[in-house]
Amino acid sequence: ADAAARLGVRDALLCVPTADQQPYALARWRPELPAAAAIATCVLPEEPGEAELQQAAAAARALPAEAAIVLDFVGHGASVTRRMRELAPGRVVVDVGGEALAAVEGLLAGELRACS
């Protein structure tokens, strides 16, 4: 959710890997967004096909134009994030897993420099 705040995300489509994860995503993100935020969820499996990516993009279009698409899981490839950006031009796509990986890589790089 820190990435959303840094990017000024006010409305969001939360993409999660299973329907069971939808209420947890809502509970996690609702406090991070403004009280009047438009927020929705959709299921986007870890390895989605084109039809599933198209469905997620359509769900995003049902929200306000500034609504971000949040990939709220880890395990998908960078190609999923890239394709969502292609399908939803002008929308912010927040890749939670990618953000976490970048943070860990930064920490490890700092540790390696400190040990050198």
Image (cartoon, rainbow, N blue to C red):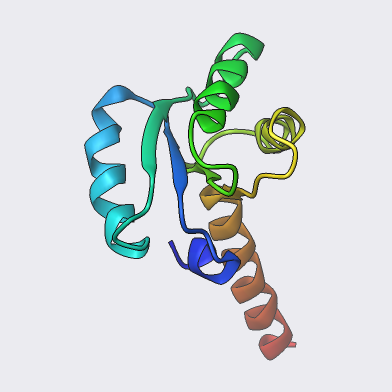
Q: Which residue is drawn at 60% across and 20% down?
A: 53
Observer able to see residue 72: no
Residue 89 lies, with reference to residue 66, above or below; the image says above
| Left or right of residue 115: residue 59 | left
Q: Residue at x 54, y 17 (%)?
A: 55
Residue 48 lies, with reference to residue 14, above or below; the image says above
Q: Nearer the viewer, residue 24 or 30?
A: 30
How many numbered marks are there? 0
Q: Nearer the viewer, residue 102 or 6?
A: 6
Q: Residue at x 37, y 53 (%)?
A: 37
Residue 34 lies, with reference to residue 115, above or below; the image says above
Observer able to see residue 33: yes
Instruction: Report the quarter where the N terminus lies.
Output: bottom left
State the image coordinates of residue 46 (x, y, percent, origin top left).
51, 26
| Left or right of residue 28: residue 38 | right
Q: Which picture quadrant has residue 107?
A: bottom right
State the image coordinates of residue 95 (x, y, percent, origin top left).
58, 48
Q: Residue at x 63, y 81 (%)?
A: 111
Residue 6 lies, with reference to residue 112, above or below; the image says above
State the image coordinates of residue 88 (x, y, percent, origin top left).
69, 33
Instruction: Report the quarter where the C terminus lies.
Output: bottom right
State the image coordinates of residue 3 (x, y, percent, origin top left).
53, 64
Q: Which of 99 and 89 is in front in this view?
A: 89
